[in-house]
Amino acid sequence: MIEVKNLHKAFGEVRAVDGVTFSARDGEITGLLGPNGAGKTTTLRMLYTLMNADSGQVLVDGIDAAADPIAVRRRLGVLPDARGLYKRLTARENIEYFARLHGIETQLMHERREKLVEALEMRDILDRRTEGFSQGQRVKTAIARALVHDPKNVILDEPTNGLDVMATRGLRAFMRNLKAEGRCVLFSSHIMQEVAMLCDRIVVIASGRVVADETPDALRAQTGEANLEDAFVKLIGSEEGLAA
């Protein structure tokens, strides 16, 4: 479980994150939505300890990210906005390198790698260098690398961005499997259809603040809109109007 409590982050005079509070629960997929510049990526970077908060608290399975960032990293599997693969290594070598960084012994590393390779349908690219991979191949490799230590909490920053239809369908099925295993899945996306299909709860951020934290049905009811995209536009539009 990931808990965010009154999180703040400023860059000079710009308040990128201004009191964000929400929870992402085990066995659920939580969507983090917002327009460009809303504070989503900054929030995610604070969650996975790449960036320190000015104030507030991030708890992962009850562990304070500021007090024990290493323990938090062990409990997180992260697909960041920059996929960050080592281009000269094969997909297999990328995965195994990160497994060894986590101190996973060889037999267990092989077992987990094989499970992820099958789940992500990446057998055909396993022994190819990642330089020259398609976007979908890069994402699959980055996800396998992020999950090889078997984390209970998974953060995916726009995982289907740039993927073709078949790769997107496969990744959505993989996310549902993570949920079925009881993991906490938090992901950001700009694709409303995807959010509606996958999310148990949706957190909407605008101007650095949470403007909604509800189920998809509750968001539609709250805004009086039958379409989730229209509900989202109404939520961020009213917030930006207040900020102006």
Image (cartoon, grey):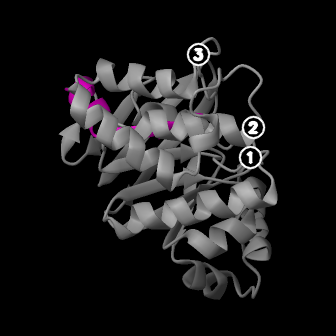
Q: Is residue 44 left or right of residue 167?
A: left
In terms of sequence position, does the residue under pointer 1 or pointer 3 come before the other?
Answer: 3
Q: Residue 189 in the image: x percent, y percent?
A: 67, 54
Residue at mark 2 to residue at mark 3: CA–CA distance: 14 Å
Check whether the beta carbons of the residues at disc 2 and disc 3 lie within 8 A of each other. Answer: no
Instruction: Tell me if residue 145 can be seen.
Output: yes
Furthest residue in direction top, as rendered: 88
In the image, the segment drawn in magenta is 68-80
Image height of 150 relative to 46, above or below: below
Residue at 77% across, 71% down: 229
Q: Which dot, 2 or 1, sits closer to the camera?
A: 2
Q: Residue 200 in the image: x percent, y percent?
A: 48, 73
Q: Amino acid at mark 2?
A: Gln
Q: Is residue 176 left or right of residue 110?
A: right
Residue highlighted by disc 3: 86
Q: Residue 54 in the image: x percent, y percent?
A: 41, 26
Tell me where residue 137 sits by quadrant.
top right
Residue at 63% across, 11% down: 88
Q: Amino acid at mark 1?
A: Asn
Check whether the beta carbons of the residues at disc 2 and disc 1 lie within 8 A of each other. Answer: yes
Quarter of the image containing the N terminus? bottom left
Residue highlighted by disc 1: 161
Q: Nearer the viewer, residue 113 or 187?
A: 113
Q: Nearer the viewer, residue 109 or 221?
A: 109
Instruction: Tell me if residue 72 can be seen.
Output: no
Q: Is residue 55 left or right of residue 119?
A: left
Residue at mark 2 to residue at mark 1: CA–CA distance: 8 Å
